[in-house]
Image (tube, grey):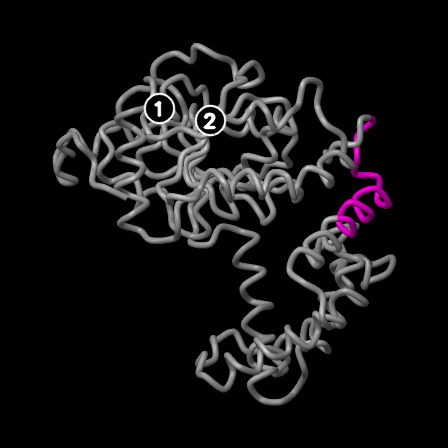
């Protein structure tokens, strides 16, 4: 990514630290139909596929020379799953336009989704460029996996319209989006983004406070770190770990989250009885939340274990299998609307 053409304000200056008032919204979030996706890798491309399936006109830009070809391949690969979920009226891959510049992508956008790689300086510079190029008042959301918006909005002229819209991979299939602003984000921009995502068929968590990694990634990361410890110590294989979730708590988590699941463990006494009964086990050495050293031995063991678990299936085969499985779970648990879209 190149540096922004305009001169960015000094982060310590009043111009940078005092948020500008967001202009009155010209388009209600439910009526917005033109979306720009900046960054077209796995996450950005997944967003493109989702918005196309929901009937939006999408413009996309990515600096990679082969971005357009890869993006259209990704959309084509996702379309069968999206068709199974149920397409919105007028939905079509033909409503995608891949532009030659960032400025062209956002020129007429009513919402912008940024999905650049997880590098803070790159995110900061890109959001500054997007702020300069996007029409006033249009909300700009970042797909960041963990950076607080406060750390990314420091050089934007108008940080008030910058929010986090953190999806789960693949964005075209997993309903969750976590929305949160930074210190200089206008609460109205957060509310607008949440309403927009809901109108676009997403399940939205609007967070009141920033926390690195947000909610879902922090929970997922704790499980991931313990899994690495167990592989590193020879306590479990990759296959053992995956089966322990897919054949165990994962089936319950597909219906309700870990808190309500634990509450049911208390029987008629609910969570209170569960805590009374199992609370002392919190002192037991059942988990290690310090991350293990990701040395070559652990790296190789995890990679080899995944190759073994794939059992000759290609990545494309596994993606198709995963997509069908998630759709089946959504269907089986009543989380599909009348037209088949995830609620």
Residue at x-position 84% and y-position 44%? 333
* Above-or-below relation of 260 to 180: below
Q: Position of residue 172 (x, y in %)?
A: 63, 40
Task: Give the extent of the magenta segment.
Answer: 324-338
Above or below residue 282? Residue 100 is above
Secondary structure beneath disc 1? helix
Which of 153/62 is in front? 62
The residue under the point 81% across, 58% down is: 264
Label 2: few (<14), some (14–19) or many (≥20) C-alpha neighbours in 10 Å: many
Q: Are marks 2 and 1 in contact (CB under 8 Å)?
A: yes
* Quarter of the image where the C terminus is located: top right
Residue 267 vs residue 184, the one in the foreground = 184
Mark 2–mark 1 Cα distance, whole angstroms, equals 8 Å
Q: Position of residue 136 (x, y in %)?
A: 32, 17
The residue that appears at 61% across and 47% down in the rendered structure is 170
Is residue 243 rendered magenta in the image? Answer: no
| Quadrant of the rendering where the N terminus is positioned | top left
Crowding at dot 1, Cα within 10 Å, few <14 / some 14-19 / many 20+, comes out as some
| Disc 1 target residue | 104
Viewer-closest of 162 and 299: 299
In the picture shown, does residue 130 fall above or below 236?
A: above
Tell me the residue at 53%/17% (across/down).
32
- In the shown orientation, is residue 149 left or right of residue 98? left
Measured as percent of width and height from the top left, residue 168 is found at 58, 48
């Amino acid at each position: 990514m190149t540096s922004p053409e305009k001169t960015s304000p000094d982060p310590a200056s009043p111009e940078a630290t005092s948020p500008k008032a967001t202009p009155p919204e010209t388009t209600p979030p439910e009526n917005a139909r033109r979306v720009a996706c900046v960054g077209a890798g796995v996450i950005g491309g997944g967003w493109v596929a989702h918005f196309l399936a929901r009937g939006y006109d999408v413009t996309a830009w990515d600096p990679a020379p082969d971005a357009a070809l890869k993006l259209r391949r990704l959309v084509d690969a996702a379309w069968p799953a999206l068709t199974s979920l149920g397409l919105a009226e007028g939905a079509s891959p033909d409503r995608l336009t891949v532009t030659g510049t960032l400025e062209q992508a956002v020129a007429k956008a009513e919402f912008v989704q940024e999905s650049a790689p997880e590098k803070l300086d790159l995110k900061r510079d890109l959001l500054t460029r997007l702020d300069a190029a996007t029409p006033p008042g249009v909300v700009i959301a970042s797909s960041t996996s963990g950076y607080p918006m406060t750390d990314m909005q420091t050089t934007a002229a108008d940080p008030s319209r910058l929010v986090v819209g953190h999806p789960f991979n693949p964005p075209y299939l997993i309903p969750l989006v976590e929305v949160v602003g930074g210190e200089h984000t206008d609460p109205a921009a957060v509310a607008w983004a949440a309403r927009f995502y809901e109108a676009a068929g997403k399940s939205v968590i609007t967070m009141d406070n920033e926390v690195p990694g947000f909610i879902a990634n922090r929970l997922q990361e704790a499980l991931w770190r313990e899994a690495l410890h167990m592989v590193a110590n020879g306590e479990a294989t990759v296959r053992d770990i995956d089966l322990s979730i897919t054949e165990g708590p994962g089936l319950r988590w597909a219906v309700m989250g870990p808190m309500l699941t634990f509450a049911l463990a208390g029987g008629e006494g609910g969570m209170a009885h569960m805590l009374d009964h199992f609370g002392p086990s919190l002192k037991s050495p059942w988990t290690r939340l310090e991350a293990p050293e990701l040395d070559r031995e652990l790296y190789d063991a995890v990679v080899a274990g995944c190759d073994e678990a794939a059992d000759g299936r290609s990545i494309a085969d596994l993606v198709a299998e995963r997509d069908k499985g998630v759709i089946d779970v959504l269907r089986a648990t009543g989380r599909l609307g009348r037209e088949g879209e995830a609620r």
